[in-house]
Image: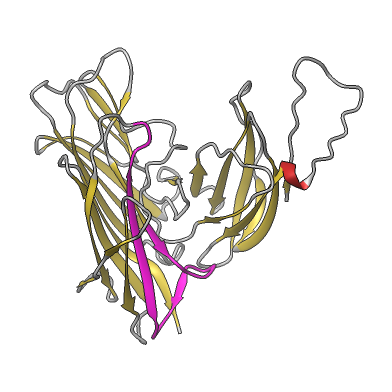
Amino acid sequence: MYDLTEGYPGAIPADLTYRPSKRELAVVNSKFHAPQEADGGEFRYSITDTFPVGMGIPEKIKLPAERTDYISAGPGRGWHQSVSSGPGVIEEREGVVRHRGGTRSAVDWFKPVWKPWLGTGLGWGQQRAGNNLEFNTPGWGDSGPDHTGFGDVWNSNSLTQFTEAYVDGARVDRRASSGAYARNVKPTEQDFRVVTDTTLDPKVWHLATKGHSEWTFKSAATPADRWTYLPMLNLGFDVDTDLHGDVRAGRRLDLGIFSEYVKGAPDTGRITGSTLEVSFDDGATWASVALGRVRGKSAAWSGSVRVPNDAQYIAVRASATDDRGSSVKQEIIRAVGVRK
């Protein structure tokens, strides 16, 4: 796949032929994961400094798939990509990516673990203006990085999502969607909690059949004339699966988790701790995973488990905390499949 763009500031040249060299193109090895064959849609939108709006129509793609992409790079060029499965029932969106010419990289779409990720392509949410807060926590971001997963909970009966917002322990909003709000919060109220519960029909999606996520954080009033991002934590997983989201039974499996703040949040602290548990019986019993810090990264940990020979799925339960009282917890049933 070639995604090429060239700009001509000031005037239109007589010769519009575009012959980019290898140094001008970035090479991206793209993998599109799917538990079973499915129809999907995909497009990479051109974003420039002078025209920051992407236009295009998603193209059909059969999942799972692998592809090599050649992309125009250089100053002033950005790209926003989205991929859907269903088609359109679940959509993954990334933020604006600025590639560097002559480089080679890799990206995974719909790779497990599917869980909430409050990414830069979200559009709104995790913000406060004065005493009003808004949250947008869609529940099926993939292992990206920075892929936020939106679900069409209004038109498809194969998935559900409920989002709740709490202020000082009292629930202030509950919606059958990814959004929730806290309006007219009192200046003395500073402890907040957001909860998202999701389901996916196992006959349709196979993975991430049940998810539960919680975020806690503290926030004082912010300027009322503009939106300020909130210091909420993201939690991500690093599991090496095949294109169907499976790992091998009877072998040792490396598991990684990492955490970071919502991009743009001011006055953040230091992410200090994490936990990880796994279950091979859909959450009936859990086993702790010993974690060690990943060298060279500020908030990443890794461990390993032996996958039983008779396992069919692996559920994960993980958390991360910081030194200012914020936390994130996630539990995903059937997060990863297991094959013999």
Q: Is residue 32 above or below residue 103?
A: below
Residue in front for this viewpoint, 237 or 140 = 237
Image location of residue 12, percent across then percent down: 84, 19
Observer-nearest of 21 and 172: 21
Q: Is residue 200 magenta?
A: no
Classify residue 338 as left or right of residue 75. left
Q: Is residue 41 above or below residue 307?
A: above
Q: Position of residue 162 (x, y in %)?
A: 28, 45
Of residues 297 and 65, which is closer to you in this image? 297
Q: Is residue 218 above or below residue 130?
A: below
Q: Is residue 259 magenta?
A: yes
Residue at the outermost front position: 296
- Quadrant of the rendered structure where residue 49 is? top right
Residue 273 located left or right of residue 189 = right
In the rendering, at what x and y percent does residue 293 appear?
29, 60
Say whether residue 3 is visible: no
> Which residue is pictured at 35% across the width and 50% down the height?
160
**Residue lying furthest right:** 14
Is 120 placed left or right of 76 in the picture? Answer: left
The residue sitting at 32% across, 31% down in the picture is: 265
Q: Quadrant of residue 183?
A: top left
Render colour scheme: secondary structure
Q: Over which residues does the magenta segment extend?
A: 237-264
Q: Residue at x 33, y 84 (%)?
A: 308
- Total numbered badges shown on the rendered structure: 0
The C terminus lies in quadrant:
bottom left
